[in-house]
Structure formats: structure tokens, C-alpha cells
Image (cartoon, helix red, strand yellow):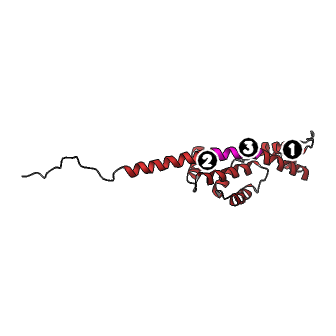
Amino acid sequence: MSVKARTDRFLKKIRTLQGDPHYIALGMAVGVFMGITPTVPLQTIIAVVLALILKASKPAAVIGTLTANPLTLPVFYIGSYKVGKFLLGDPIPTDIQYESVAAFLKLGTDMTIAMLAGGVLLGLVPGIATYFIALKFFQTFRGRLKNRKLEQKDEPDTLTLPDKQLSPEKP
């Protein structure tokens, strides 16, 4: 499947999400937030649970978690760790080799706590931004759909005859 076809399919899924704009935007925000936090492989499950608790769109939360991908995960994980260590007031060891996520995860509980603290902070800004962007998008999108439906409703279903009635021709 081509990139364009995948993108079109993804956008169609977003456009067909059910609920009011706030409900969908909150779900997207929860998903993006969880997608950035270091919670793989549980990020989707946690996002759905948070969406349930916050009364947000669960499908939108799942879609929002798709912001995390194999290319961005190492960046977010290392960033989460560094921000978390800073927040916790711990010096960051300079001899850590960031060769792989697996090697990085061998640092233990202190690293996990630092990553979670940093991940929450790093996830807040994109999560909040996603809420407002998605809210505006769905308000605009739904407004346009509503206007189209109203325009279609105003159009007559049948052709109207001109003011002059045509009389049947006499032979």
C-alpha cells in the first residue's frame, strides 16, 4: 500500500470519529501524551483507560498513540531520562552508552523513575497542543459538514417549472 493510500485511510479514520469536538480532541490529546511517555508496550492500553476515566474518545486516544513510532522512541526515551534526572536533581551519568533502547533500560529503577517523570513533562506540551489543534480541526470540520447538509436541504429536490404554465398543444 502506498504512503498516499495509507495517509488517506488514516485521515478518513480521523474524520469519521464519533462525538463532539471536545470529546474527540481530549481523546487525541490523551493518546499523544501517552505516545510520548516511556510506556511502551502499554501506552495504548493506558491511553484507553485514561480516556475512559476522562470521558474522552477511546478510538481517538488509540489514534493519538500512533505518534510514537520506532524512529522517535529513542529520542523521547533519552529525552525523558535526561529531563527526569534534571527534575529529580540527580546528575546524569556521562558514561552511559546509548547504543540501544535495551542497553538504556538496563539502568534500573532510578532510570525508570527518571524516565517516567521526564516523560510526563515532555508529554504535557504536545498533549495540550494536540487538544487545542484537534478541537479547532473538529469544530471547523463539523461546521463545514453541517453547512453542506443545510445547503443540500435548501436545494429543491425537483426541478421547478417557469412561471408560465405550458399548455398542451392542440392538434
Q: In this view, does 16 lie above or below 2?
A: below
Say left or right for 80 vs 108.
left
Return the residue at label 1: 87
Q: Which mark is residue 135?
A: 2
What's the amino acid at mark 2? Leu
Kind of residue sitting beneath label 1:
Leu
Residue that carries the numbered disc 3 in the rendered image: 125
Q: Please tell me which residue is depicted at 11% across the width and 51% down the height of the picture.
A: 169
- Evaluate if marks 1 and 3 touch, with contact meaning CB atoms under 8 Å apart: no
Q: Residues within 10 Å of mark 1 (few under 14, many from 20)?
A: few
Q: Please tell me in which quadrant of the rendered image residue 122 appears.
A: top right
* Amino acid carrying mark 3 in the image: Val
- Pick whichever, 169 or 87, lies toward us: 87
Disc 1 to disc 3, C-alpha distance: 16 Å
Q: Do the residues labelled 2 and 3 touch (CB within 8 Å)?
A: no
Instruction: Give the mark nearer the N terminus: 1 vs 3.
Output: 1
Q: Where is residue 137 in the image (x, y as percent from the top left)?
A: 58, 45
- The residues bearing labels 2 and 3 have C-alpha atoms spaced at a distance of 15 Å
Does the segment drawn in magenta span residue 131? yes
Q: Which of 147 and 14 is in front in this view?
A: 147
Residue 61 appears in the rendering:
yes
